Image: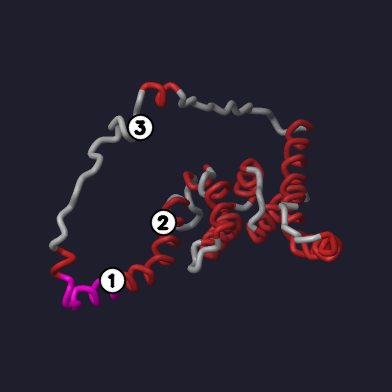
């Protein structure tokens, strides 16, 4: 069915860390919120697990973290999705915090630690509107534009079906490109290596 295809498309996007449309994610959520929650949080755990991959984290910030899905109630848990994300982030960072605490405890035992503690704080800039910084100035405030998105309440029909199909097509295209990218880059490298140094570009 179309909704099952949407769900599979979203799953492929999250497994390959490829761009997806917000609307497709929300349609998948309405179809099966429990499965969609599992897909989203599974990818978040992988992205936030040390060592963090820069490309995957950029994908997470741009497409996942900015999603409105985090404001939705989490199925079965009685929480909101953003609370589920906070729990994931806490679990991923707990071992890092323990390592940092261990380092700090070690430093406290060092003979030079009192000298480090004796270093006085020095305030260079105390306000965000300081002239040397340039933040919160009139020209900066005037440059900020508010963006509003209008959502049309259309009934299910041919227009909605076309809308769903279009979203699915984009998601399938980006996830397929992500799956083929390594093989594509290898092939192009083989073909172009005789012409000089080859540098990968997004597919």
The residue carrying mark 1 is: 101
- Camera-side mark, 1 or 3: 3
Q: Secondary structure at mark 3?
A: loop
Q: Position of residue 53 (x, y in %)?
A: 55, 62
Residue nearest the viewer, comparing 14 with 163: 14
Location of residue 199 by image quarter? bottom right
Residues packed near mark 2 inside 10 Å, few (<14), some (14 to 19) or many (20 plus): few
In the rendered view, tell whether residue 188 sits above or below residue 122: below
- Judge left or right: residue 36 versus residue 120: right
Range covered by the magenta-colored residues: 102-113
The residue carrying mark 3 is: 135
**Secondary structure mostly seen in the magenta stretch:** helix
Residue 145 on the magenta segment = no
The residue carrying mark 2 is: 86
Q: How many marks?
A: 3
Q: Position of residue 74 (x, y in %)?
A: 48, 52
- Camera-side mark, 2 or 3: 3
Q: Secondary structure at mark 2?
A: helix
Q: Position of residue 43 (x, y in %)?
A: 57, 61
Q: Are marks 1 and 3 in contact (CB under 8 Å)?
A: no
Q: Position of residue 79 (x, y in %)?
A: 42, 53
Residues packed near mark 3 inside 10 Å, few (<14), some (14 to 19) or many (20 plus): some
Residue 107 on the magenta segment = yes
């Amino acid at each position: 069915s179309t909704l099952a295809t949407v769900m599979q498309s979203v799953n492929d996007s999250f497994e390959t860390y490829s761009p997806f449309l917000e609307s497709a994610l929300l349609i998948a959520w309405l179809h099966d919120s429990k499965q969609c929650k599992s897909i989203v949080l599974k990818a978040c755990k992988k992205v936030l697990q040390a060592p963090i991959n820069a490309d995957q984290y950029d994908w997470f910030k741009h497409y996942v973290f900015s999603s409105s899905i985090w404001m939705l109630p989490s199925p079965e848990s009685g929480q909101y999705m953003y609370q589920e994300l906070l729990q994931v982030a806490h679990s991923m960072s707990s071992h890092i915090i323990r390592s940092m605490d261990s380092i700090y405890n070690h430093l406290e035992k060092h003979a030079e630690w009192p000298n480090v503690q004796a270093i006085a704080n020095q305030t260079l800039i105390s306000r965000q509107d300081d002239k040397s910084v340039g933040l919160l100035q009139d020209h900066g405030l005037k440059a900020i534009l508010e963006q509003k998105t209008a959502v049309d309440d259309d009934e299910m029909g041919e227009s909605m079906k076309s809308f769903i199909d279009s979203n699915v097509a984009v998601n399938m295209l980006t996830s397929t490109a992500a799956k083929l990218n390594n093989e594509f880059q290898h092939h192009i490298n083989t073909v172009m290596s005789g012409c000089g140094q080859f540098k990968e570009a997004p597919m």
